[in-house]
Image: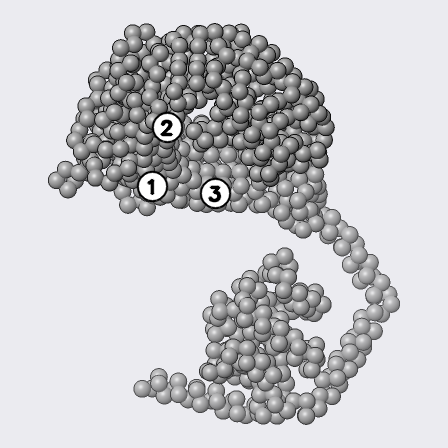
Amino acid sequence: MRVTAAVLWTAAVLVGLQKSTSSPDNFVDRSSQNLSSVPTDLPQTTEFLDLSRNYIRQLHNGDFQKTTHLRFLNVSWNNLEEIDPQTFLNTPLLEHLDLSHNNLKNLSSQQYLLHTVNLLVLNLAFNRFLTMTLGSEFSSLVKLERLTVGAKNISVGDFKNIAKMKLRTLTLLLEDGLYYEAGSLEDVHAQRLQIAFGHNQKIDRNLTADALSLFAEVEMMNMINGYKDLSKQLRETVKIHTTSFYLTNITIKWHDLTEYVNVALNTTLKHLDASDVHIMQPPRVETEVIKTSQVISFTASQAVVTSFFFSQEALYNFFISMPVDSVAITDTPIIHMTCPKSQSPIRQLDFSNCAMSDSIFSSVVDDKFVECQNLRNLKNLTLIGNSLKKLEILSQRFQYMSSLQHLDLSVNSIGYDQSSQCIWPASITNINLSSNSLTESVFQCLPNGTQILDLQNNQISVVPQSIFKLKNLSTLNLNANRLRDLPGCGTFPTLHKLLLRSNSLHAPSVNILESCPELHILDVSFNPFTCTCTLRGFIKLAINSEKSNSQSGIKLLNWPQGYYCTYPEDVRNSTLRDISIPEVSCSIGLLVVAILVPAGTLIISIVILCHCLDVPWYTGMIWQWTRAKHRARLQQARPEDLVGLEFHAFVSYSQHDVDWVRNSLLPNLEGPAGGLRICHHEKHFVPGKTIIENIISCVEKCRRSVFVLSAHFVKSEWCHYELYFATHQRLTLGSDSIVLVLLEPLPQYLIPSKYYQLKSMMNRHTYLEWPQDRAKQRLFWANLRAALQTDLPNAPVTQVQEHWAEERLEERQGLIG
């Protein structure tokens, strides 16, 4: 009973919170604080106040004088005996009031309600009310939607003061020793009647009769027994006004459940619902279900079987054999569902949040799977949140459902490995495969007649064009995937709506949309846009989409709020509509004209000026002087400065670039043409030493350090250490001790912040770029050898030449042999 009250109060609060726009500061929780009276320090902005589980005996006039904005008040689980009639004089906005679990004694004298005309929810359950007689003050609650109350005696006329109200829900919490007079509820006008039973309380026949004859929806909660009486009364009742009958938080034997269902199926009820069901003594043999019924839907949620020894097939067969339009079994740990033994009238099935596997609806005969052929009337099938794995197998399970139109397989672990073909019924028009593990291969396993396709939150990186056409596809949802560009519509000629939110689109190619003549709605928001020249076409399309007479006819969803730049840094987080990319910087023709005309004019002017002033002669003289000074500076190196140096250079590179180092760099530096001694980790790192020790040792033995820069280099932690120690060595050997070789283009924004020294050197020093043109590579090697050439005291050139001569001799001998 306490659980029921808590649930009712929580539901009421949540409904109110949805309507409220208040901040969290307006919610005050003073529950379980041993209070004996309402606190006097409540903030004036309080809208939600919880005073439950205290020791408050009385509510006085002025207790809520400061809280004029109060909308929610919970004073349950106190010792309330008296409430002053003026208590709520200053709370005209009060909508939710919970006074349950107290010691109030007279329902006909609740004068404080005269000042709560805006109440939507009132809970007076579990007090000491002997009779259900509601006083005249209840008639002032003209906005009341939910009323929860309980008393030991319910008589005719007790509800006459709310006869003019139209409640959404009336909840009666029945107490032990209940007396109910037939016809007592005739004055109540409510959409739903909830009856919450006490422990081991039996069904009152008169109350049930009134409930079935007066209310469109009837819900019985907390039942443990009395199901035979309920089934008997349903069977004997000729005229039932109720259309929806609910059983909530019940414990029931399998035999009683099936008897109740069979009886209810034979009545004029339209909807049966059971939630929080504990099934005892589950079946071991088949249980028959009646063949025809006027009931439209059967729903069961959060059902649990309390025994491990029973026939799962018998249990499944009972539910799948119901003669209704819709069956829903949700949030229940069932792992399989059988196929009906005869053609089923069911048109909708919902097994959301269960534990269904790929074997659903199938059976095994002689070690072979037999597919279900008795669900040909099924139109909607929902299998959200199960344990489904293989799409091709599932297509076979559904192949004989010839009326199936809507299929929801979202939130599973479905993939498609192309091991076999998919066999879908031709009737499917709407399929939801979101939140699975699908890749682009899924487009080879889709129903041909699909009109609406939901593939959001998968692992799709591209939409392949070499697939069969989905000629009827009008809506494609690819949100939260890995797409890098817009998909073409060559295979979707009638596509009307395309959703690509939260993918990896940097610069969508607008030209692709020319293949989508029927496309009118596009969502590309929240992608990492790179605001460079390649994005100008998309920005133009987006701005034009704001106009009512746009030529493209495409409406861009979430524009402009959901479209931001992520690069370059100077426009990061700016909306695409607010940035400007000059046309001259993006048009090659304009750029050539803008650069060449001024440059040509300047060059001609300089040539004429130089000729007149004899500048070439002076320039040659200055160049000769500079070279002489440069040689002089190099010759000042003292022999003692070169003591301990064994190598001309230490080469640092990423392991991803090892092929270039082995096949190009080392042969051109160490060979006969180079004559240099090169240190690198594959050859000169000493086993047994740590990597750090080897790096320091090699750097200290080398006159210079060569760094082979690439995108892989800046991702390597060891390359970072090598650059770090070489930079410190540079302080000793001079600024020319580090030589940078750029193996591939390396934009500044790709270099991590920890490589700040590398960024500084690339900005201030010249580096060598590896040319892809073979004709330019000879000059590259000449410049690199010149930069590394040094006369080392312990590395005579003759030794190097002798070493290479020995290798050539060995090669000749090998050829002769």
Q: Return the mark for residue 199.
A: 2
Q: Residue furthest left?
A: 366
Give x and y (percent) for residue 287. Answer: 19, 26
Residue 535 seen in this snapshot: yes
* Residues at marks 1 and 3, CA–CA distance in whole angstroms: 21 Å
Q: Quadrant of residue 708?
A: bottom right
For the residues labelled 2 and 1, say whether their Cβ atoms are less than 8 Å apart. no
Residue denoted by label 3: 481
Query: Which dot, 2 or 1, sits closer to the camera?
Result: 2
Q: CA distance from mark 2 to mark 3?
A: 53 Å
SS state under label 2: loop
- List x then y, in percent, for residue 784: 61, 75
Disc 2/disc 1 C-alpha distance (Å)? 38 Å
Which callout, 2 or 3, points at the residue further toward the start of the chain? 2
For image coordinates 37% across by 28% down, the residue present is 199
Figure coloring: one colour
User: Is residue 581 placed above or below 18 in the rendered structure?
Assistant: below
Say if mark 2 contacts mark 3, CB within 8 Å: no
Q: Closest to the observer: 338 or 294?
A: 294
Instruction: Tell me which amino acid carries mark 1.
Output: Ser
Q: Amino acid at mark 2?
A: His
Judge depth for marks 1 and 3 and give the one in front: 1
Which residue in the protein does label 1 denote? 387
1 or 3: tag closer to the N-terminus:
1
